[in-house]
Amino acid sequence: MSMNFNFFMNDVVNQARQEIVSAGYKELKTPAEVEEAFAQKGTTLVMINSVCGCAGGVARPAAAHALHYDKRPDHLVTVFAGQDKEATETARSYFTGYPPSSPSFALLKDGKIITMVERHQIEGFDPTSVMAKLQNEFEKHCEEL
C-alpha cells in the first residue's frame, strides 16, 4: 500500500511542479539557487508551491493567469514546500514579518520583501480573486512590460 502511495505522491508532486514551470516560473531547488535568484535586481514573484488542494485548485491557476497583465514582476520563481525543504527555508528567511505558509506568494524588490499573499488569502477563494490580489500588487510595485 505505501509503495503505491509513494508512486501516487510522486505523480502529484511532478504534476504540481510541471504546472508552475509551464506557466513560466523557474524552480529553485537548492539554497544556492534561491540566494542567486533573490540577488537579482528588480521585482521577483516567489510562488511557494505545495500539494494541497488550494495550491492545485486556486494558487497555481492564479499564478499562471495573473501574468496576463500590463505590469508584472521581472522574475518569476518557485520553491516547493515539503519537497525542496532547504530551498524553501532559505526563501522563507527573506519573508521577514510573515509566518511560513503554503501555498503563498511573496513579492520582493531587489531581494527585500514587499508583500505577501498568504495561504489565508488563497484558501477558500477562487483563482480569479487571488489573481486580482496578485495583479493589484503588480500594479503597485512592478513596471509595465
Image: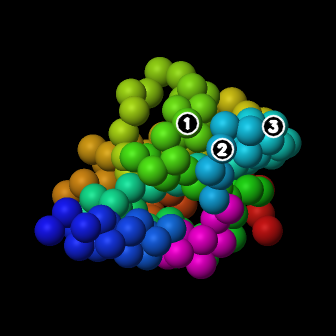
Residue visible at 65% across and 72% down? 24
Region in magenta: 18-26
Residue 33, percent from left and from top: 73, 45
Asked if residue 31 lies left or right of residue 95, the reply is right
Q: CA distance from mark 2 to mark 3?
A: 14 Å
Residue visible at 77% across and 63% down? 144
Classify the position of the C terminus by image quarter. Answer: bottom right
**CB atoms of marks 2 and 1 within 8 Å:** yes
**Which residue has dot 1 on it?**
86
Residue visible at 60% across and 71% down? 21
**Which residue has dot 3 on it?**
39
Residue 122, percent from left and from top: 31, 54
Work out whether mark 3 precedes mark 1 in sequence or the reverse, and give the earlier one: 3
Work out whether mark 2 precedes mark 3 in sequence or the reverse, and give the earlier one: 2
Asked if residue 12 lies left or right of residue 5, the reply is right
In the rendered structure, which amino acid carries the disc numbered 1?
Glu
Residue most extreme to the left = 1
Check residue 125 for magenta coloring. Answer: no
Residue 69, percent from left and from top: 62, 72
- Bin the neighbour count of mark 2 within 10 Å (Cα to Cα): few under 14, some 14-19, many 20 and up: some
Q: Which mark is residue 73?
A: none
In the rendered structure, which amino acid carries the disc numbered 2?
Thr
Query: 97 or 35: nearer the eye?
Result: 35
Q: Secondary structure at mark 2?
A: loop
Q: Residue 111, relative to residue 107: is it above or below?
A: above
In the rendered structure, which amino acid carries the disc numbered 3?
Ala
Q: Secondary structure at mark 3?
A: loop
**Which residue has dot 2 on it?**
30
